[in-house]
Image (cartoon, rainbow, N blue to C red):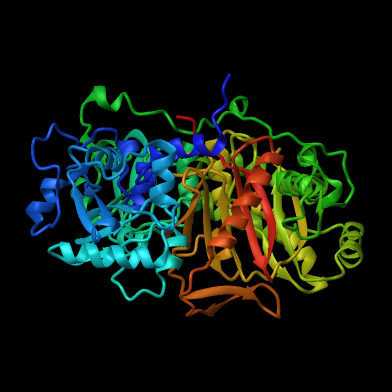
Amino acid sequence: MTRIPVLRALCLLLLTLAVGQSFVFGQMSRKPSPSKNGREGMVDDNGKRYLNTIRSAADFDAMARVYNAKTPYALPHAMFIIDRKDNNKVYFVNSKKYRFHQDFANALYLSLKRGEDFFKEVYINDKRRLIVGTIAWQIPVQKYTFEFWEGDLIKTDLIKLTYDAINKAFFKEVAFKPNSIRQEDESAELKIAKISADEISKNQEYLALNTAKTVGRIHVIDKLDDTVEIGYNEIVVLNELPLDLPPVAGIIVSKPSSPLSHVNLLAKGWNVPNAYIKNANELFRKYDGSWFVLETKLTDYKLEPCNTKECLNTRPEITPIYSRDKLKSPPSDLNVRKLALLPEMRKKDSISYGSKSANLGEVISQNKTKSFDVPEGFGIPFVYYKEFMESNGFFDMFEDLYADNDFVHNPSVRRKKLEEFRAKILAGKFDDKLKAAIIEKWKTALGGKPIYVRSSSNAEDTGNFSGAGLYSSVENVTEEDRIVEAVKTVWASIWNFKAYEARERNFVEHSETYMAVLVQIGVRMDNGGVMITKDPYDRENKGAVYISATWGHNVGVTSEKKSIPEQILFSPKSNSVQVLTRSDQETMFVPDANGGLKEVPFTNKRRVLSDAVARSLVKVAGQIKKMFGGVEQDIEWGIMNGRIYIVQSRPYIEAKK
């Protein structure tokens, strides 16, 4: 059997993606994609094959096809080809007639090359005869842009040539829209009009964060605080994404957010509709209190009244069942008592030290290339939490709470009672021998350096329950006297309101949920964030890596702060790194000399990650995914003095559709 050379196979694949890839990612980057949209916008057009000048909007419309017509993501666009051999002659291609650049170039005998040869000529060759790209009308910003495929290795001089030739032949200014960090770098010094994907996305009207269908009652909430009661059967309409939510039927938010925010991850786990809709609070106010069927789709959403018995009977039953025989107990081994160093742990030790610690131990053991580091640390196993709770009578106190009908059925009462319960735990008596052992381990194994005291329970990072953002950690503990206090804070976070609600929603037994503690040397991050080893918007974009990044400590990403992080997507199909949004942070978090983190003013508007650093992170993400048998990973990282540090890796969990 004849084997196709790897490069040729790759080129043939990339050719079919000539001007883009997934539409869902296109929601963020606004890129036309004939390979994804098929023949949408194509017609049997008997009109002109091309125009050499566009003198009006009508001329552009005559050449343009439209993807996702009559939706917030309608994207009129037309291909162009510039022939450098013919005095930079511009062909505005009738894109209703021709699907790909190659089709048009062959039809006009501008090139007879096909497949791999055409690909290399127009996307790789520095001395290419033909420059190919796309002009689009960007509805969110009401401007025309020209762009190249994100994998195009076009150089600075050819970008400038294209800008001049297009604008000479077009009736309005056409700005350049870079589609990769590499293209941004190549055009950085050019004095030309530019528009970034970030500028466009800020003006978008809709973004599906989780596609699903539900039935629920609309509840418009302008300000979410402890006085607002939220029911499990409600479709909540929020002004901005909160730090946490109890289980609901659907989520609509009026301001954009990161797909890795805690609430967005919860929505995926619940498999409920979740979307950003511009000005949603005002759009849906007239429906407040009414029942609707809500379906969030990739390109738009559907909202239909539901006031019949038949409709209401289709409502998914998502009420938690308060029955002991319905609950499941997370696995645990309470025989292990050793304060083990991370290199002594493996993934299997999660039943003693929790997945956070055990997974890091697994990563350390398999990090053969040493392309990144894991900060040193040790684990305090589950057994000590159990003994602490028993010796102080706290499990008995919880049984009394669970028997209280007001606690079970009233969220406000439950929130208040849990807060009081945590205060009692923080005041509980701590075993003197354990305290001495922890302090000794901190001094001898970690050199008495500033540490992060982190949660690592048996009810998080499992195969079907993330637990992301549910529990508390204590950052930058610098004094011996505060270490035990920090450990108790982590133990008490088992009873955080949002953690309790998540366990109820997932039928997890509270009294058999145990908390181990990871004591780990802190990393003074120059920048940090989270990355996942897949495209969170498009499951068909195989091999992609999404990165969320911020200046300073990655708590700016993981703690649900209001600023938007820099969001990047690496696509292996085009070998490109694309910026979805720029960081809008005005402050960053740095270690405080007195312990903890402090928020300081920040005015640096530079890109958080360069192309090279982003690719280094992508490489590390791939290595870690391989360590866990190809399971998609949600990875927390930081960079200090140019070195990558991994501080957590857990399965990336979303509901199966």
Q: Determine which quarter of the picture holds residue 487.
A: bottom right
Left or right for 304, reference 412: left
The residue at 53%/39% (across/down) is: 7
Depth order, front residue of 158/324: 158
Relative depth, front residue between 108 and 599: 108
Residue 539 shown left or right of residue 277 in the figure: right
The relative height of residue 607 versus residue 263 in the rendered view (above or below) is below
Q: Can you give x and y, in whole percent of width and height, for residue 477 in the image? A: 74, 70
* Residue appearing at x 29%, y 40% in the figure: 100
Q: Nearer the viewer, residue 302 or 6?
A: 6
Q: Residue furthest front?
A: 85
Q: Which residue sits at x=46%, y=50%?
A: 259
Percent of width and height locating residue 35: 34, 37
Tell me if 460 is positioned left or right of 283 in this view. right
Q: Quick one: quadrant of the C terminus?
A: top left
Estimate the x, y position of residue 427 in percent, counting from the top left.
73, 62
Looking at the image, how many numbered discs can be counted on the residues? Answer: 0
Query: Image check: 154 left or right of 534?
Result: left
Relative to 273, say whether 221 is above or below: below
Asked if one can make out residue 536 in the rendered structure from this viewpoint, the answer is yes
- In the rendered image, the residue lying farthest to the top is 1
Residue 495 seen anywhere in this rendered image of the structure: no
Q: Where is residue 429 shown, x and y percent of the image?
A: 81, 59
